[in-house]
Amino acid sequence: MEWYILKSVTILTTLLLFYKLLLEKEDMHTFKRFYLLFAVIASIGIPLITITTYIEPTSQNFDPALLQSSEEISIAEDLSFMDYLPFILWTIYALGVTFFSIKFIRNLKELLLKVRRNPKVKKEGSTRILVREEIDPHTFLNYIFLNKKKYDQKQIPKEVIIHEEAHANQRHSLDILFVEFLQIIFWINPLIFFLIDFIKLNHEFLADREVLKKGIQKAEYQTTLLSFSSGHLHSDFVNPINYSSIKKRFIVMKTQTSKKTIWTKGLLLLPLIGLLIYSCSTREEEEKTNREPVVNSQSAEKATPEMVSEYNEIAKSYNSQDAKPVEVTDYT
């Protein structure tokens, strides 16, 4: 188990470093979206790959002294603290799973109750939930949560609405739900928390790109983002307008990545993934099985004429005078 965790952390660390250093600030957001989902799947799946190597069978001599020694060691281990360590570790793991399961269910319930209890305005592709309390605009699935007073008074700029509609139309919440669910099982991998932040930030890049495609002026849009980033607390499942990410978003808005760069960085992944599979998969050795039939050489050996003659001489010396000796003539 500990080796699996170590390999999983190593894989996710490597892939996230590659993302942070080479991909994050590039204008290839759709590719990055699927790359980040692949990263978490690879960190879970690659350590489970088994590569079998077949070796020649080796003969082993049995030493009773070694058996006695191993029995003494096992008895000593049974009496040590290490016998209880697996139970302690599994208990800690189960507590973590319980904690993150409760957190997942609570966040989901909170959002669904908000949808149920507040007035709704249905639009093409999304539903706007008008909330009475002061909130930043945010999206979950196809629900866009907006402050009712500001919405009724038309104080929410169209850039913000377009931004949130992009989250809804591109189903960004499904990515977050998927990774948050995996976090319940693999919470022991600390890098999954960074992965969630990277995914959410890339969702913002995708939504920003959709806004700019609509012809909104970049400077005007950036000013709007600053005015709507209040820093209110929100559910882990949503993408609110966050001040801490705005600086990176402004930088990425100015970036244009060439197709050559996209292909080059994409192809760099192939040897990296191959190296991770080779170094972090499970190795297994099996002895080759000898499928050739074993023939008893003694039973297959034929008698030679010299052997037959020798046998007849021996038989004659032991035969009595009254008994008729029997000669062997067929030596095949």
Image (cartoon, rainbow, N blue to C red):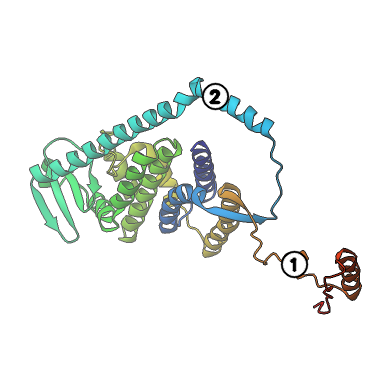
Q: Is residue 159 above or below residue 63?
A: below
Amino acid tagged 1: Ser
**Camera-nearest residue between 15 and 138:** 15
Classify 310 as above or below 264: below
Q: Pointers 2 and 1 in contact (CB under 8 A)? A: no
Report which residue position mark 1 lands on.
Answer: 299
Q: Which residue is mark 2?
A: 75
Instruction: Say few, some or many: other residues with alpha carbon within 10 Å of mark 2 (under 14 / 14 to 19 / 20 or more).
Output: few
For residue 184, which quarter of the picture? Answer: top left
The answer to whether residue 37 is left or right of residue 224 is right
Q: Position of residue 6 (x, y in %)?
A: 52, 38
Secondary structure, mark 2, is: helix
**Outermost front residue:** 322
Q: Is residue 27 visible?
A: yes
**Residue at 38% over, 28% down:** 92
Looking at the image, residue 319 lies above or below residue 240: below
Q: Is residue 46 left or right of residue 206?
A: right
User: Looking at the rendered structure, which numbered label has been put on residue 41?
Assistant: none
Question: Position of 96 compared to 86: left or right?
Answer: left
Q: Quadrant of residue 196?
A: top left
Pinpoint residue 99: horizontal percent, then vertical percent: 30, 32
Residue 287 rendering spot, x and y as whole percentages: 64, 54
- Say which of marks 2 and 1 sits in front: 1
Number of numbered discs visible in the structure rendering: 2
Q: Residue at x 45, y 56 (%)?
A: 27
Q: Position of residue 95 (x, y in %)?
A: 33, 30
